[in-house]
Amino acid sequence: MLRTVVMMIAVILAVTTTTTASASAQPRGDARERRDDVRDLQVSQALMAELDAAVARRNRAAVARIDQRVRAAMAAELAESRRELRDEERGRGGYGRGRPHQEQRELARERAALERGERLLNQYSVLQHRMDRRSLQARRDLLAELVRLSEVELRQARLERAAGRRPDYRVHR
């Protein structure tokens, strides 16, 4: 059970973590983040499969347990994202000097991801105790959105790693 809760927290990490963390990571941290992104995607897909199975079996108790795991993980990840955003805004996020426009774009992305995560949590919370067909489908749709966001995060991290390996041939004056 604890392992599942930890995995759920990882799912939400993909939803609210933006490119800021990946861009400022050291090579060793980058590998860890890459593994986390892959794990986040796998966990998101597993949760959706668990929800599908619970709905197919008409197991209300299993649906309720999945709901609790999703909400707890989302809340924990949102709290972590708020801390990371606060650190970034205070300038401890690893941004280099002389890049204020990029920094502002990254902070805007971070804020947007946090707001998106809060919206998803609110939408999921509204549906939590409902067991009608539409509510169950809406839950599945929200989990599908988590999967989609995990895939986007993984793709974005790959692009950033590729961009980070390319040499910068511009002339610096």
Image (tube, helix red, strand yellow):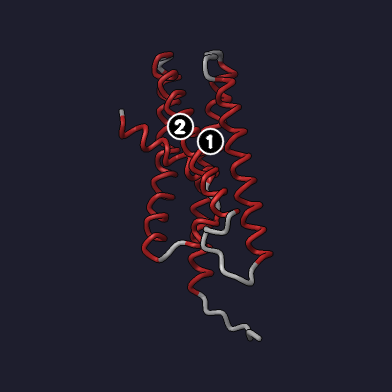
Check contact, mark 2 vs mark 1: CB within 8 A: yes
Report which residue position mark 1 lands on: 144
Determine whether 83 is above or below 123 in the image: below
Precedes in sequence: disc 2 or disc 1:
2
Left or right, residue 100 beside residue 27:
right
Q: For the point 48% across and 73% down, which residue is it?
A: 165
Mark 1 residue type: Ala
Q: Position of residue 77 (x, y in %)?
A: 48, 39
Q: Quadrant of residue 56?
A: top left
In terms of image quadrants, where is residue 61?
top left
- Look at the picture and state if 50 lies above or below 40: above
Amino acid type, label 2: Met
Q: Could you say where residue 31 lies in the image, as x and y percent from the top left? A: 38, 60
Which SS class for mark 1? helix
Q: The N terminus lies in which quarter of the figure?
A: top left
* Residue 134 appears anywhere in the view: yes
90 horizontally vs 105: left or right: left
Q: Nearer the viewer, residue 81 or 145?
A: 81
**Which residue does the image show at 60% across and 53% down from the upper left?**
89
Task: Give the side of residue 100 with respect to residue 51, left or right.
Answer: right
Identify the residue under disc 2: 48
Residue occupying image coordinates x 46% and y 35%? 76
Mark 2 neighbour class, 10 Å CA radius: few under 14, some 14 to 19, many 20 or more: many
In the shown orientation, is residue 12 left or right of residue 110?
A: left
Find the distance from the CA under tag 2 to the CA under tag 1.
Answer: 7 Å
